[in-house]
Image: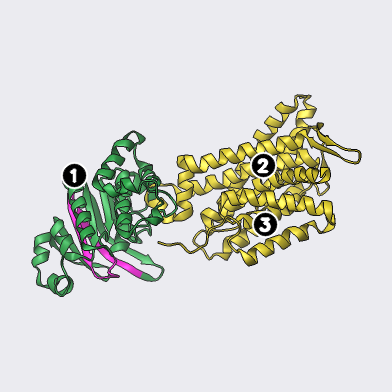
Chain colours: A yellow, B green
């Protein structure tokens, strides 16, 4: 029981991170119908900015942990937003209206480019940082096993909950969210009511990048080591999460992220850690066979 | 108010408009009639910059808008209720109207939506339903209402009568006449239902394979033997 609870906590933490990244995939898919394969790289860049940021702050002698995290989050969001915006502007917008495969190939190219770009600038070795958030709560303790919830896990889960609530409100309640939903349904009609479609698409990339940046910062704090390859690994999981939840569906992305995180944690704990990815992707394949629109996705065909 | 001069539009290699020249004056209802595929809808979309005219010029209030982005053309005061209505199916009726008000001053929102609900009372009842659940006639009303929410000075209507029961068509045409009379809104109306359209309009143009082939007042065109033969006789006029 204690062991199970511990794995649930670990899985939730991991799932929160996947969920944040998955939102970026699903939003972009919803609005322009393409998979932004460079999105994982944006998350990786967020993590690198975190490493650099924390290193600089500690050199400056800033010792307040909440302050340092806040500064790094803001800087990471700002930088990755620019990356997210630029990726769309350079690699996808010129191909809009082209055949469907073109932006996809461009996205894969962008992903490879960004990986190599970071590798050249930062080196291929893993980057460690000193643990910044340490300690935690002991929830339960028996003779063989102690269930603990570390402060960093609390931070990750809380941040994710706050961001997801905020983000849902943005989509359902604000003019920008309405414009995004309109663009998602009919780009031409959206432009006919006077929505600046290009700007709305850019903002979608910027918001997705911002959420990925937060995930990148959190993962840096959680694991303490990163390398230029983490974007690919997390990206493909988050993509699986988005598909599992139903690509195009925002609650789906969040739910998919959580499920993938939990599956990974439980599989690693009860079976073999080597085959955790196999488990994740097997579930994805099963869902796609028996429910191709994902858990919360809607069918393509609509009554008009 | 609106002036098109020798406008050519292409869809890939197909020339959909072959030099269209047309005028709409302030306060007028002008109708554009013609068979399927004559280029009527293309003309309305070209005015909005989707697709852009390949040749010729489009002026609105004397200013050249031929090369402008769609959203900025709309911001100048043009709204369109397009072919096929294009309601945002997963947004509610209310949200569709909110989206329609994108370019309007938010201060007018409450009174504008009240006007739309007065014009089409059924929309008030359907307020929180998703657009996709409405009937064809209701969707058409929503499409026109959505266009009006942008407080346009020129309203482009693409076949508002298509596929609707005669009763509903009557209601919609009465609404168009009412908006034009009460608010002085200028209307460019594309129709296949030539009889109704020409009776409603001050002036009309007849289009054939991408060209304007005839123009005149509504009454003149109704009396014109060619128009009668091509678009009126043999049809059922409710």
Q: Mark 2 lies on which chain?
A: A
Rendered image quadrant of residue A3: top right
Q: Which residue is drawn at 77% across and 38% down?
A: A221
The quadrant of the image that shows the N terminus of chain A is top right
Is A236 covered by the magenta stretch?
A: no
Q: Where is residue A169 in the image (x, y as percent from the top left)?
A: 52, 39
- Which region is colored magenta? B15-39
Q: Do labels 3 and 2 share a chain?
A: yes
Q: Provide the secondary structure element on which disc 1 rests.
A: loop
The alpha-carbon separation of the residues under discs 3 and 2 comes to 19 Å
Percent of width and height locating residue A48: 74, 42
User: Residue A178: in sight, yes or no?
Assistant: yes
In the rendered image, residues at marks 3 and 1 fall on the same chain? no
| Location of residue A51 (image quadrant) | top right
What chain does mark 3 sit on? Answer: A
- Whether pointer 1 and pointer 2 mark residues with C-beta atoms closer than 8 Å, the reply is no
Q: Is residue B35 magenta?
A: yes
Reading the image, the residue beneath label 1 is B184
Rounded to the nearest angstrom, the CA distance separating label 1 from label 2 is 52 Å
Query: The residue tagged with tag 2: helix, strand or loop?
Result: helix
The residue beneath circle 2 is A213
**Is B145 situated left or right of A264 in this image?**
left
Q: Which residue is drawn at 13% across and 55% down?
A: B202
Image-based side of A65 in relation to B65, left or right: right
Q: Residue A240 carries which label?
A: 3
Decide whether the magenta segment is chiefly helix, strand or loop: strand
Question: Callout 3: 10 Å neighbours few (<14), some, many (20+)?
Answer: many
Q: Position of residue B112 (x, y in %)?
A: 29, 40
**Residue at image coords 46%, 45%:** A178
């Amino acid at each position: 029981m204690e062991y199970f609870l511990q794995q649930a906590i670990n899985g939730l933490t991991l799932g929160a991170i996947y969920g944040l990244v998955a939102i970026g995939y699903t939003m972009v898919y919803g609005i322009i119908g393409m998979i932004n394969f460079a999105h994982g790289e944006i998350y990786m860049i967020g993590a690198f900015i975190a490493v650099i940021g924390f290193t600089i702050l500690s050199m400056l002698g800033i010792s307040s942990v909440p302050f340092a995290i806040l500064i790094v989050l803001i800087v990471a969001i700002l930088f990755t937003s620019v990356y997210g915006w630029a990726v769309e502007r350079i690699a996808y917008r010129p191909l809009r209206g082209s055949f469907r495969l073109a932006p996809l190939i461009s996205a894969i190219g962008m992903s490879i480019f960004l990986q190599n770009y970071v590798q050249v600038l930062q080196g291929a070795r893993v980057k460690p940082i000193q643990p910044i958030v340490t300690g935690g709560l002991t929830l339960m303790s028996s003779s063989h096993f102690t269930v603990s919830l570390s402060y960093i896990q609390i931070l990750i889960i809380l941040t994710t909950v706050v961001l997801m609530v905020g983000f849902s409100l943005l989509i359902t309640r604000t003019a920008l969210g309405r414009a995004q939903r309109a663009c998602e349904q009919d780009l031409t009609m959206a432009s006919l009511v006077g929505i600046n479609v290009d700007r709305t698409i850019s903002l979608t990339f910027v918001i997705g990048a911002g959420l990925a940046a937060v995930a990148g910062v959190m993962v840096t704090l959680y694991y303490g080591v990163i390398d230029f390859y983490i974007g690919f690994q997390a990206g493909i999981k988050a993509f699986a999460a988005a598909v599992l939840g139903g690509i195009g569906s925002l609650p789906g992305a969040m739910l998919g992220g959580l499920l993938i995180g939990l599956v990974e944690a439980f599989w690693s704990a009860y079976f073999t850690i080597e085959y955790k990815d196999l488990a994740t992707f097997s579930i994805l394949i099963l869902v796609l066979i028996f429910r191709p629109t994902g858990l919360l996705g809607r069918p393509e065909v609509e009554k008009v | 108010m609106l002036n098109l001069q020798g406008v050519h539009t292409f869809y890939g290699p197909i020339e959909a408009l072959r030099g269209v020249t047309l005028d709409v004056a302030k306060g007028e209802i002008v109708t554009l009639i013609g068979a399927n595929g004559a280029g009527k809808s293309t003309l309305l979309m070209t005015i909005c910059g989707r697709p852009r005219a390949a040749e010729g010029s489009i002026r609105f209030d004397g200013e050249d808008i031929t090369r402008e982005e769609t959203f900025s053309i709309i911001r100048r005061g043009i709204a369109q209720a397009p072919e096929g209505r294009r309601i945002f199916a997963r947004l509610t009726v209310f949200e569709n109207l909110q989206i329609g008000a994108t370019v309007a001053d938010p201060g007018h929102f409450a009174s504008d939506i009240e006007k739309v609900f007065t014009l089409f009372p059924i929309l008030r009842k359907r307020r929180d339903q998703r657009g996709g659940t409405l009937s064809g006639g209701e969707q058409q009303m929503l499409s026109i209402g959505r266009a009006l929410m942008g407080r346009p000075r020129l309203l482009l209507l693409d076949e508002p009568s298509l596929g609707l029961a005669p009763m509903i068509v009557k209601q919609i045409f009465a609404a168009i006449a009412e908006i034009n009379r009460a608010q002085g809104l200028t209307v460019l109306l594309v129709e296949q239902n030539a009889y109704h359209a020409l009776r409603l309009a001050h002036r009309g143009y007849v289009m054939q394979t991408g060209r304007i082939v005839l123009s005149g007042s509504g009454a003149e065109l109704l009396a014109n033997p060619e128009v009668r033969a091509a678009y009126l006789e043999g049809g059922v006029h409710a």
